[in-house]
Image: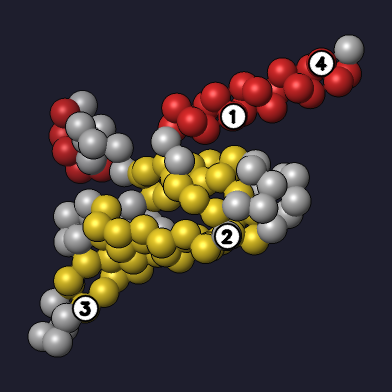
């Protein structure tokens, strides 16, 4: 069975995706977006037509005010994040996202009771 794992690729130590957490500038709602680092990224080439890095433009919409937010992320050749620019929102940590979702869920639970 080892040969199958080598043929199709076993689990790597590093996840092939990243999670982007964004807070809407208008209403404060939070959004989580999953980016597959091997399928979602576009290749950037240098003058010698060699891979110089990767980039992605991701559009997101929250479920409160439905405002469109746009993220543009740039990665190096090893798919490590170099820069991120968000229009209509701001990047937050996973912890901030989890806390905001918990507060939102509690508010919905209290409203339905």
| Above or below 14: residue 63 | below
Q: Of circles 2 and 3, which is in front?
A: 2
Question: Residue at image x 14%, y 77%?
Answer: 50
Are the residues tagged 2 and 4 within 8 Å (C-beta)? no
Q: Whole-Å distance between the Cαs marked 3 and 4?
A: 53 Å
- Which of the two labelled residues, at mark 3 and mark 4, occupies the earlier sequence position? 3
Residue 100, label in figure: 1
Residue 62 percent across, percent down from the top left: 67, 48
For the N terminus, give its image quadrant.
Answer: top left
Q: Nearer the viewer, residue 12 or 70?
A: 70
Residue 42 percent across, percent down from the top left: 35, 68
- Which of the two labelled residues, at mark 4 and mark 1, occupies the earlier sequence position? 1
Question: Residue at image x 41%, y 61%?
Answer: 85
Q: Of circles 3 and 1, which is in front?
A: 1
Residue at far top of view: 113
- Which of the two labelled residues, at mark 3 and mark 1, occupies the earlier sequence position? 3
Mark 4 crowd level (few <14, some 14–19, many ≥20, 10 Å Cα): few
Residue 45, label in figure: 3
**Tag 2 secondary structure:** loop
Q: Quadrant of residue 28?
A: top right
**Tag 4 secondary structure:** helix
Q: Whole-Å distance between the Cαs marked 2 and 1?
A: 18 Å
- Which of the two labelled residues, at mark 2 and mark 1, occupies the earlier sequence position? 2
Q: Whole-Å distance between the Cαs marked 3 and 1?
A: 39 Å
Kindly identify which residue carries mark 2.
88
Kindly identify which residue carries mark 4.
110
Are the residues tagged 4 and 1 within 8 Å (C-beta)? no
For the C terminus, give its image quadrant.
Answer: top right
Q: Nearer the viewer, residue 45 or 8?
A: 45
> Can residue 34 be seen?
no
Mark 2 crowd level (few <14, some 14–19, many ≥20, 10 Å Cα): some
Are the residues tagged 2 and 3 within 8 Å (C-beta)? no
């Amino acid at each position: 069975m080892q040969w199958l794992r080598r043929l199709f690729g076993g689990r790597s130590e590093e996840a092939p995706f990243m999670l982007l957490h964004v807070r809407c500038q208008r209403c404060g709602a939070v959004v989580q977006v999953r980016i597959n680092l091997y399928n979602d990224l576009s290749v950037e080439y240098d003058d010698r037509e060699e891979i110089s890095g990767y980039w992605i433009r991701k559009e997101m919409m929250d479920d409160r005010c439905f405002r469109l937010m746009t993220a543009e992320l740039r990665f190096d050749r090893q798919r490590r994040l170099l820069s991120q620019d968000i229009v209509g929102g701001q990047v937050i940590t996973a912890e901030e996202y989890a806390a905001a979702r918990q507060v939102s869920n509690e508010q919905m639970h209290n409203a339905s009771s």
